[in-house]
Amino acid sequence: MARRTPTIPEATVARLPIYRRALVELDESSAINVSSERLAEMSGVNAAKVRKDLSYLGSYGTRGVGYDVDYLLFQVSRALGLNNDWPVAIVGSGNLGQALANYRGFTQRGFPVAALIDVDDKKVGATVHGIEVHHVDRLEDLVAELGIAIGIIATPAGAAQAVADRLVEAGIQSVLNFAPVVISVPDGVPLRQVDLATELQILSFYQQRNAASDR
Amino acid sequence: MARRTPTIPEATVARLPIYRRALVELDESSAINVSSERLAEMSGVNAAKVRKDLSYLGSYGTRGVGYDVDYLLFQVSRALGLNNDWPVAIVGSGNLGQALANYRGFTQRGFPVAALIDVDDKKVGATVHGIEVHHVDRLEDLVAELGIAIGIIATPAGAAQAVADRLVEAGIQSVLNFAPVVISVPDGVPLRQVDLATELQILSFYQQRNAASDR
């Protein structure tokens, strides 16, 4: 029987990778225990929220001692499904696709980039950071042969939806979209959309507020 | 006297660019009005939250009609400070820096990329997507000469903190960090950190949950 996964709020899920990064850093500096206050500070979250979030994983820490770094790292990683490797295919081998293929930490965090895929015959057959570029005609075969779990879309906006449709049809488990366009996938297929300009707009808000209060 | 900017919750600020994207799409399809339900659906947020978020901008819509698309787009853009242009410099002209320099929508959304900056003499003087690559020795001059508002860090992890320090020292207004390392800046300097592996970890969580419920 499958282990029951408790329901964890979406906002908590989004913070787990941030806690995990802090815990890896603590582990590398040989810390044994960590207080919720320290973890909060490292993660930019308040301590009460850290404690609440971790309670969803069944982690409560010990008064006066805090959390065991090793064990908490194990728990967070397990909750995130990082005890498995999830092979990734990147569709689009332009600058963004290449940057993603070379992004430190995809492989070390359990997301080995198994293939780059492109529509341009001139790019097919090349090797980018050790990863072969395949023709998009082989997309379905590659997903099956390489056991691709996650499809990353790094194509121009106009191609993104069609690529998403093919990835889903080929049996991919989830989709990460970097193309600057909103795409849709069937219910039940996890989808994250990263719009790089969103972050700039958020900065712009705070900048403008700072400028107004300086006047 | 400066117009007083009302206090808008952080989570609301983070959703404003998402509403804006939906409104631009509606505007391009010549829609005159939009209901909070439709806006919610396009933004992946529930309708009550949309209404609450927009109320911070003083926007309440009209019962049975909804919001005026044009005017709401103006209000959201103004709140985000997008009625100004904010020139951007990208430090690091590797694949990621080049991908960002070529990202559709930075310029059209008011973030013209004014300069690429690199430490590698072999890259200096080149032109990438119409943008000149300058030597990092000129960073301070460039910030002043070009009126750079936002510094984007696309360097390897090891260089990121030193670059952030120089950007802040040079008078930059805010920092967007893509290097896979946590950096710090003085209080009052808006900072956003984008960790591309975070999104994959969030997908991994939902994938694992789906896999468990299929078993």
Image (spheres, coloured by chain):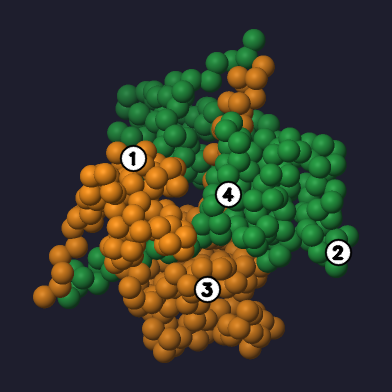
Chain colours: A orange, B green
Q: Point out residue A175 in the picture as x, y percentages from the top left corner.
A: 42, 66
Q: Point out residue B199 in the picture as x, y percentages from the top left corner.
A: 44, 59
Residue hosting label 4: B183
Residue at left offset 62%, top offset 21%: A212
Q: Report helix, strand or loop for mark 4.
A: loop
Q: Report helix, strand or loop for mark 3.
A: strand
- A84 relative to A198, above or below: below
Which numbered circle lies on residue A154? none
Residue at left offset 52%, top offset 73%: A90
Q: Is residue A35 left or right of residue B189?
A: left
Q: Earlier in the sequence, mark 4 or mark 2?
A: 2
* Residue extending farthest right: B125
Between residue A16 and residue A47, name the one nearer to us. Answer: A47
* Label 3 vs label 1, nearer the camera: 1
Q: Point out residue A26 in the picture as x, y percentages from the top left corner.
A: 43, 57
Quarter occupied by residue A4: bottom left
Label 3 crowd bin: few (<14), some (14–19), many (20+), radius 10 Å? many
Residue hosting label 1: A47
- A28 relative to A60, above or below: below
Q: Earlier in the sequence, mark 3 or mark 1?
A: 1
Q: Tag 2: residue type? A: Asp
Q: Report helix, strand or loop for mark 2.
A: loop
Q: Tag 3: residue type? A: Ile
Residue hosting label 3: A90
Q: Tag 4: residue type? A: Ile
Q: State how far apart marks 3 and 4 are (Cα).
A: 28 Å
Query: For the N terminus of chain A, which image quadrant?
Result: bottom left
Q: State how far apart marks 1 and 2 are (Cα).
A: 46 Å
